Structure formats: C-alpha cells, structure tokens
Image: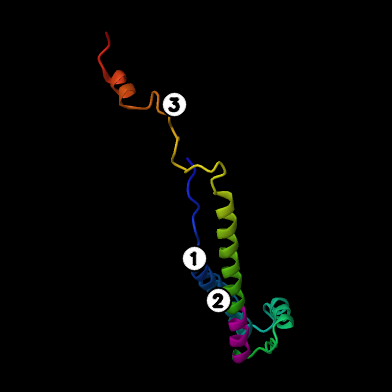
Amino acid sequence: MQQAAMKLSPLAMGITVGLICGGAIFLVGLVALAAPGYGDALLSGIASIYPGFDNSGTFGDLLIGTLYFTFDGFCGGLVLAWLYNLVSGLLHRPTNGRDEGSGQGEGNGQDEGNGAGAQSEAVEPGD
C-alpha cells in the first residue's frame, strides 16, 4: 500500500526560511558592527547583489540588508515548498489506475501467519 505524500505549506516554509536567512544576516551584521572587519567578504558579496545595501557599517544599512535577505529567504522558501509538493505529488501518484486501497493484501500471502491464529498456536500448551 502506497503512503500518501506529505504536503508542505508554502507560506509556512517561506516565513521560516525568511526568518532564518534574515536572522543570520542580522547576527553577522551585529557582530560586524561590534568588531569591524568581521564578515566583510560575506557582507560585501551581499552588497554587490542588493541595491541600497552598501555594507557601510551602519545600523540602518544592516536593517536594509536584513530586509532584503528576509524577503529573498521568504521567496526561496515558497519556491522550495512548491517544488517539493509538485515532485512528491508526481512520485506518489497511483500508476495502475486503481484505487490505492483496492486489492491490497488479498491472496498475496501477507496476512498468512500474522493473524490471531498464528498467535493462538504459539501460546497453546504442547501436545
């Protein structure tokens, strides 16, 4: 019997990934404000992608970068959940055209020896 595919909520995944990405950049930026030079390569790379984020070492700039990365993480999470649902739906479709529950376990030997009869034989006193 084939198990149904689990569905992910694209909105929940987007919010989760967005918060993780935004939080990570915010923490790196906070450490960079306290210890100049920390994470410069990462923050400069991000500054080269996002207009308005200059890696200038100011708190306002940090907030702009955090918002950009939160939004990108949200969009990435949406796409990830959508793709997961698409692929898992394709992989878990019945291919024989029958209902998933019809004909399963009938006459294929799966039920033999596993029922109450097998247990009662094991617990009966020896003859």
Q: Is residue 58 above or below residue 46?
A: below
Q: Which residue corresponds to mark 1? A: 9
Q: Amino acid at mark 2?
A: Gly
Q: Which picture quadrant has residue 80?
A: bottom right
Kindly check if marks 2 and 1 are in contact, taking CB atoms under 8 A apart as contact: no
Q: Is residue 40 left or right of residue 125?
A: right
Q: Is residue 81 above or below residue 98?
A: below
Rendering coords of residue 35 (x, y %):
64, 82
Tell me if residue 64 is in the magenta stretch. yes
Rendering coords of residue 114 (x, y %):
38, 27
Tell me if residue 126 is in the magenta stretch. no
Which segment did they paint magenta? Answer: 60-69
Residue sitting at the far left: 125
Q: Which residue corresponds to mark 2? A: 23
The disc, 2 or 3, on the residue closer to the chain's N-terminal end is 2
Going 58% across and 50% down the picture, which residue do you hit? 91
